[in-house]
Amino acid sequence: MPGEGLAVTDLRPGEEEALNALYNETFNFSRSLAAWRWKFQKIPLRDLVVVRCLRRGGELVGQGASLPMRFRVLGREVVAGQMVDFGVRPSVRFDLALYRLNRILLKGLRETWMAQGMPFIYGFPNERAYRFHKRIAGTRDFLWIPVWTRWLNPLGRFLGRVRSKSLLAAGRLVSRASWCRAAQAARARAAGGTLRFFSLPEPDERLDRLWEKAAPAYGILSYRDRRQLAWRYFEKPGRPYDVWLLADELGPLGYAATSVHEEDVRVGYMVDVFGEPPWTRTVVHRTLERLALSGCDLVRCLAVESSVLGRGLADLGFSRESQQVPMIGLIFDSALEKESFFDGRNWHVTYGDFDGV
């Protein structure tokens, strides 16, 4: 019978592999168990992680979770919850009893978040999850964040979707040569200067110094201190990121985290960019140089259009795509119910704020 034996429970010991398999089935993904453990068991503030399961007759058929994320919000230090992994097994997606059970799951999670003192919770859902959260959880739109792109390969944009490998390779040679000449000219002009942009093999105290110095210049952003960045970029299984630091003789000025993916073309993602606002444009430009020299055809980045990063991307020739990523959520602290919380100019959001790249 539909609805028979339905229950909402916590994750039970030893079920991690089954829950991760359910995630892969639900989202047509191939996340490893090591990546699941990194995400849920090695995150800072792991004691505040919440994982809830939907069961039918004892079988796992759905899940919903939240990760604790430290934030600076208009001068306040808070911990907010990021909604992740919400979904049900495709074979039972249209079971109305499960639809009602999801309401129970979300009600329980909401009570947990409020008991933990979280002023707000948020998420970056795909299209299906966006409709689900709006309808079932009553979430609100916080932001719509555009994706920005810039071609590095001068031939890439003219080849259409069916791309010639030989022409792409030729374009990469042209791109590398162009960026090499520009980099050499820049170094000649800056001869005797101390500005450096270099790979950071391990997280160190310079990331804490950068966070303490730069964070007060931003209105709303998640933590980017050494502890958080170590988990996000250096400890993820397979470590698919490079972290680059911009510094002078007085200390760090900014960083970028990048990841290169082979798609229709070779895409370099600026997963994260952060630093003192006057140096943001320099960090982006130096990152473009590194991605060009590594043979990337196209660069993608995520940023609020009116933010410091968004303006820097526009200045450096990035184009705003039609694609936008929604940021939704619920507010539990009435002190945040003001225009400044929803003003995109106050937010700093990148791909690094969720496990999407």
Image (cartoon, grey):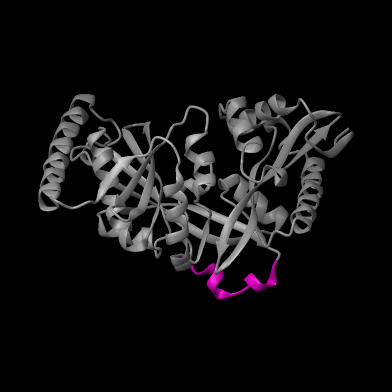
Q: Quadrant of residue 96?
A: top right
Q: Quadrant of residue 38?
A: top right
Identified at 37% across, 62% down, the residue is 308
Residue 151 lies, in percent from the top left, at 25, 44
Lateral position of residue 288 relative to residue 103, left or right = left
Identified at 79% across, 57% down, the residue is 115
Q: In this view of the protein, which residue sits in the foreground, 230 or 308?
A: 230
Residue 4 lies, in percent from the top left, at 89, 34
Q: Quadrant of residue 341?
A: bottom right
Q: In this view of the protein, which residue sits in the foreground, 223 or 7?
A: 223
Lateral position of residue 312 relative to residue 11, left or right = left
Identified at 17% across, 38% down, the residue is 175
Identified at 62% across, 31% down, the residue is 36
Q: Is residue 263 above or below residue 147?
A: above
Residue 322 lies, in percent from the top left, at 39, 53
Q: Is residue 341 magenta?
A: yes
What span is colored magenta in the figure? 333-344
Visible residue check, residue 144: yes
> In this view, which residue lies farthest toward the front?
249
Locate the N terminus and report the quarter of the image it occupies. Answer: top right
Residue 235 lies, in percent from the top left, at 52, 34
Q: Is residue 307 above or below residue 340?
A: above
Visible residue check, residue 3: no
Lateral position of residue 198 relative to residue 330, left or right = left
Lateral position of residue 226 relative to residue 270, left or right = right
Q: Is residue 325 magenta?
A: no
Q: Does the magenta stretch mainly form a helix, a strand or a loop? A: helix
Q: In this view of the protein, which residue sits in the foreground, 176 or 147?
A: 176
